[in-house]
Amino acid sequence: MSRKSKRRRLIERIEKKAEAAKTLTWRVHPFMERRLRSALAVGATALFTVCVSYFAPPNEPFYLGVPPFMFVVLNGFWLPTTYALTDDGIEIRRLFHSQKADWGRFRSFNYDNEAAVLSPYEGPTRRAMFRTLTLLFGKGRKAEILDYLRGKLIDVKDHATATDGKADGPETDSGAAGDH
């Protein structure tokens, strides 16, 4: 093997690693991760089926359609979802459909312990409710995902802390509260 081919392979490996660093991918499966919520969802489906079967006319078995209906309604809970953040945009892949969004569509994001909500507005508004995109964190990926989002969008909590000295989360400075 010549030096040129070794060097070319080394360069290709470095480029692949750099490309992989630009892409952040993770998979979330809420049904498997949260046992209590899973048990409650199965119990609610069973209870809803029993209630519908009790109140349905005896000759029309409406209750047979309840479990498939609940499965379709809660498919994001029952089935795994794969999230991919790239330089081009965001891709959310589910079993039945995929969703893609460009970074230009979003200006800010807000987050809690379980998810980040991307908004087309620079600050929190009531209008953003139907235009947001939610990214579930999964286990152990919260800091990595938030760092990636901070590089692309405005962090509403950090922005509020910097301008007002107040925030909802634990990021609030204890010294800033005593200055007022």
Image (tube, rainbow, N blue to C red):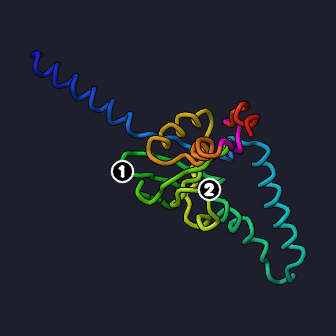
At x 69%, y 37%, the residue is 172
Closer-to-camera residue (112/12):
112
Q: Is residue 36 magenta?
A: no
Image coords of residue 33 (percent x, y): 68, 41
Residue at image mark 1: 88
Left or right: 104 in relation to 26: left
Left or right: 144 in relation to 58: left
At x 23%, y 29%, the residue is 12
Image coords of residue 94 (percent x, y): 52, 55
Closer-to-camera residue (60/178):
178
**Badge 2 local density, few (<14 within 10 Å), some, or many (20+)?**
some
Q: Label 1 vs label 2: CA separation? A: 24 Å
Kindly tell me whether residue 116 is visible in this rendering. no
**What residue range appears in magenta?**
165-171
At x 61%, y 32%, the residue is 140
Closer-to-camera residue (142/10):
142
Image coords of residue 116 (percent x, y): 59, 48
Image coords of residue 124 (percent x, y): 61, 57
**Badge 1 local density, few (<14 within 10 Å), some, or many (20+)?**
few
Residue 69, picture quadrant = bottom right
User: Residue 108's mark?
Assistant: none
Q: Amino acid at mark 1?
A: Asp
* Image quadrant where one finds the C terminus: top right
* Image quadrant where one finds the N terminus: top left
Residue 59, picture quadrant = bottom right
Q: Is residue 170 magenta?
A: yes
Query: N-terminal of the two: label 1 or label 2?
Result: 2
Q: Amino acid at mark 2?
A: Gly
Kindly tell me whether residue 44 is visible in this rendering. yes
Question: Could you say whether the residue bearing mark 2 is in a helix, strand or loop?
Answer: helix
Q: Is residue 47 above or below residue 80?
A: below
Residue at image mark 2: 76
